[in-house]
Amino acid sequence: MKRLRIPKNLRIDKLISRFPTDKIQGFHRDKVYAILHFLRSQMRHLNRHGYYPGCKKLYFVPLSSDVLNTVVGKSYKQLLEWMQLAGIIVIDRHYIIGKKCRYYRLDDHYLGSSPKWVTVTSESILRKKVDPKWHLAPTSVEYLHSWLEPSKLQIDAVAATKVVEHLAQKRIAKYRGANISDVKKRAGLTKSMTLDLITEIQKPKDRYDQDLFGYRLHTPLTRIKKELRGFITCEGEEIVQLDIRNSQLFFSLWLLNSKNWAVSNTNHRELKQLFHNSTFTIGNSKSINTSYTIMVVKSLEIRYGQGLQHHPYCKDVCSGTLYEKVVEHLDKAGFFPTHWKFKQKRRKVKKTLLAQLFANPNDVEHQASTYSDDKRPIIESFQEIYPEIYELFQMIKLTDYRELCRLLQRVESTAVLGKVCKAIRKELPGTPIYTVHDSIATTRSNIDAVKQVAFDAIADFIGFEPALKEEPWSEFSNALPKRLRPAA
């Protein structure tokens, strides 16, 4: 028996009677259900603002034509057109061959609907794998899958569902007076998708995939709201995660070592994986961008040592004082309102600076938002304090502004998945392991041993010692009302 997840308020019989399907070859309602199931699966990758990576339209996601053709057959284009005519989906028809694909989303009427499960009766659908087959990037992660099984990972679904209801109502109340219909739609969609994740944690199935951009591993644990992690346990034991302080900037230290830019070394498997399909692809070492980047890093190493060990940027990142240095620089220029406290200033600098480092300075939209007059002094302060690092980052972004973000995510994934988790599996066999991108989680009784292994593995790979911080998942629920918090 195969079951598919579709919007609860979909009335397929009424739509079929109103919009004839006799011209669609091999039409079956299960094919519509399969497309909706695939669409909802893709929506797991929407960020907290409702955008899919690389798409500027709210709630729109891509659908692979290969998957659609495999699952529903050659008539998938006719099915998509019928679904739009019937008001089930909306299609963004603007696409550029090789650059931009078509995007799809549920129609407003179904966008915030709760899900329901339907049983498949079509023989052709029963024979197919409806869930998209995600390509696992070169870093192998299969060994992490066993710890996602419901027999080991449990969630208090009743208590978590009450929190989901509370957060949805809180969001609506917060934005009352704005475009309330849009707010309700967003809140309803978030609620629906979060309830889906709670269900996923309880169901034994393949619940992980790894993207090709930064090789990040995506599981229900990475997608679920932070406040709900406190309701999750491993074999009844509390889960604690290890966070790397200043993780985004810390992983950039890997890029400051010339030996890591040996992209012409085709025998180095790890480097081939990390630079795969980037502007610094193996075999492209003769390009101006690649060779010039290597030359700049090597010239800096003459002054600051191998891997820039003695550069102020490296020292400030490792000590966790970089944002403080930028705040101090801006304070001297009178940048902040006089009534702002230090924490507020630091929060502003951290959020804005990271956005600016990864943004496209030549893009009109980025210039209007990320590089606006009230934010530009932050990146300018960073440039004044660490001029060589700023220029190096801009050089990496020269051909494609996303390159810095892509490389840092791949360094993170290689460190966490390829180094730390494999070391834990080897040195501490049978130890529960969970990852939330740049964080490693395990049970309370194993945290000390895992922390030591993680510290050694990251320091060996990056070349600098990380600052690791323990965070029990139960503390993520402290912002909730006491009546909704996990039982102690």
Image (spheres, rainbow, N blue to C red):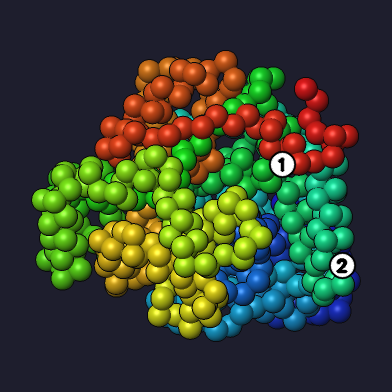
**Residue 253, position in %: x, y?**
31, 47
Mark 1 lies on a secondary structure that is helix
As shown in the figure, which amino acid type bears the numbered disc 2?
Arg
Q: Earlier in the sequence, mark 2 or mark 1?
A: 2
Q: Nearer the viewer, residue 213 or 19?
A: 213
Decide if residue 356 is on the left or right side of residue 153.
Answer: left
Q: Residues within 10 Å of mark 1 (few under 14, many from 20)?
A: many
Any part of residue 349 in sight: yes
- Residue at numbered disc 2: 176
Q: Residue at x 52, y 67 (%)?
A: 334
**Residue 143, position in %: x, y?**
45, 30
* C-alpha gap between disc 2 and disc 1: 23 Å
Using the image, determine if residue 388 lies above or below residue 260. below
Which of the two marks, 2 or 1, is nearer to us in this view? 2
Decide if residue 357 is on the left or right side of residue 194.
Answer: left
Using the image, determine if residue 79 lies above or below residue 464. below
- Residue at numbered disc 1: 227
Q: Residue at x 37, y 52 (%)?
A: 408
As shown in the figure, which amino acid type bears the numbered disc 1?
Glu
Q: Residue at x 73, y 49 (%)?
A: 194
Q: Are marks 2 and 1 in contact (CB under 8 Å)?
A: no
Q: Nearer the viewer, residue 1 or 191?
A: 191
Any part of residue 75 in sight: no
